[in-house]
Image (tube, helix red, strand yellow):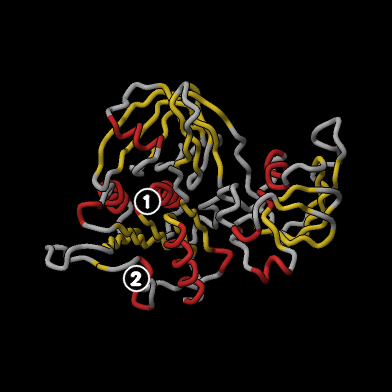
């Protein structure tokens, strides 16, 4: 095993040794009673994760020996009963009680450190479907990667919510942006979104804290299927921008689902990518609740209905990027596995609204 850290990363506490088996074996040290995922990320380890709150299940880890205390009710866990019985737990909710041995596939990707920066709203624009396009000009450059998200809050407010970046960071070695964009859906009763939608907020000071999550990391030359539900389009746009620029050969099919024709938003951004990269992006909007007598000539139904043999892609050779509400994402994941997609190439961001 490779020792990434031979001494405790904090002083004054009892240290515990974590031995990792998987694609990239490692050994590192954390403090007793610390959360496994946070401690690993604080040390720059590429630990699989996304939501960090026990919902997405991407930090699923198998305990081989030692003791970890789960900090959430297992009845609410995304893990199956069989997985729990076989020693799996969520690293984001696992408090380490002593030396442990675990099995998880660590990555070798650079982990962007957490940052907290201020800025002012430079664009506040209403889009169809009760969506706001929000852009924030930052006081200092902010590092992130396509597919990640950050917490936003108005200066002086304790209300903060997380949203995915809707554009890729600059293509430089630091991935540092001086302006960032988001697509934010109005959530009835939601403190942040109701505040944001009440009036034009251009010029207001905001705080940005992040980035979080891991998504969009794959071989840049691998073609992909992107499935977005509602404002799940935000991270899909960022991932498309980045991956199309990184590769000269990768092609992408984008399935974009909303309820009605009047809720289709940001189509101009997708059409701009289609024009910029001819022959490399196929767009398939699909409406789940469009009136039967409307003039809509496109696809109708749920996004999963388009994932079939007729889509014209080799599911065993591509990557997928799925973003949207939890039920939709889980249904798409199940469908992709049935179509023969490699589980390691299914990248998902499961939105869990808070109101």
| Of the image marks 1 and 2, the number of the one nearer the N terminus | 1
Vertical position of residue 307 compared to residue 221: above or below: below
Q: Position of residue 289 (x, y in %)?
A: 25, 63
**Marks 1 and 2: CB-CB under 8 Å?**
no
Quadrant of image for the N terminus: bottom right
Residue 312, which numbered label?
none
Q: Residues within 10 Å of mark 2 (few under 14, many from 20)?
A: some
Q: Position of residue 196 (x, y in %)?
A: 34, 33
Q: Left of 126 or right of it: where is 180?
A: right
Residue at 31% over, 25% down: 202
Residue closest to the eye, 65 or 194: 194
Residue 233, which numbered label?
1
Residue at 42% over, 62% down: 328
Vertical position of residue 58 compared to residue 355: above or below: below
Q: Position of residue 48 (x, y in %)?
A: 63, 53
Q: Residues within 10 Å of mark 1 (few under 14, many from 20)?
A: many
Residue closest to the eye, 249 or 354: 354
Residue 306, which numbered label?
2
Residue at 39% over, 29% down: 136
Residue at 27% over, 35% down: 125
Q: Position of residue 114 (x, y in %)?
A: 60, 34
Total marks in image: 2
Q: Quadrant of residue 252?
A: bottom left
Instruction: Kindly state the secondary structure of the residue where label 2 is placed.
Output: helix
């Amino acid at each position: 095993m490779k020792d990434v850290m031979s001494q405790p990363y904090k002083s004054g506490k009892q240290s515990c040794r974590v031995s990792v088996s998987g694609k990239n074996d490692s050994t590192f040290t954390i403090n007793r009673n610390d959360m496994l995922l946070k401690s690993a990320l604080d040390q720059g380890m590429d630990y699989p994760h996304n939501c960090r709150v026990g919902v997405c299940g991407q930090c699923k880890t198998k305990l081989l020996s030692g003791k970890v205390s789960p900090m959430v009710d297992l009845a609410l866990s995304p893990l199956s009963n069989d997985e729990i019985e076989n020693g799996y737990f969520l690293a984001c909710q696992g408090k380490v009680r002593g030396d442990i041995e675990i099995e998880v596939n660590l990555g070798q990707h650079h982990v962007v450190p957490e940052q907290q920066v201020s800025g002012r709203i430079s664009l506040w624009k209403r889009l169809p479907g009760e969506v706001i396009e929000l852009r924030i000009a930052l006081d200092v450059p902010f590092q992130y990667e396509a597919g990640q998200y950050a917490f936003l809050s108005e200066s002086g407010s304790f209300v903060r919510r997380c949203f995915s970046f809707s554009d890729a960071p600059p293509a430089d070695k630091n991935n540092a942006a001086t302006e960032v964009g988001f697509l934010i859906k109005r959530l009835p009763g939601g403190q942040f979104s109701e505040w944001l939608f009440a009036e034009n907020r251009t010029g207001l000071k905001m705080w940005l804290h992040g980035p979080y999550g891991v998504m969009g990391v794959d071989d840049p030359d691998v073609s992909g299927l992107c499935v977005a539900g509602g404002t799940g389009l935000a991270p899909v746009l960022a991932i498309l921008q980045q991956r199309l620029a990184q590769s000269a050969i990768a092609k992408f099919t984008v399935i974009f689902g909303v309820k009605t024709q009047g809720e289709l938003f940001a189509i101009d951004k997708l059409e701009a990518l289609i024009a910029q990269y001819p022959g490399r992006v196929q767009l398939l909007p699909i409406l789940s609740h469009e009136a039967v007598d409307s003039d809509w000539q496109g696809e109708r139904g749920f996004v999963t209905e388009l994932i079939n043999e007729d889509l014209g892609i080799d599911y065993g050779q591509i990557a997928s990027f799925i973003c949207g509400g939890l039920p939709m994402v889980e249904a798409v994941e199940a469908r992709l596995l049935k179509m023969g997609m490699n589980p390691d190439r299914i990248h998902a961001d499961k939105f869990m609204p808070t109101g």
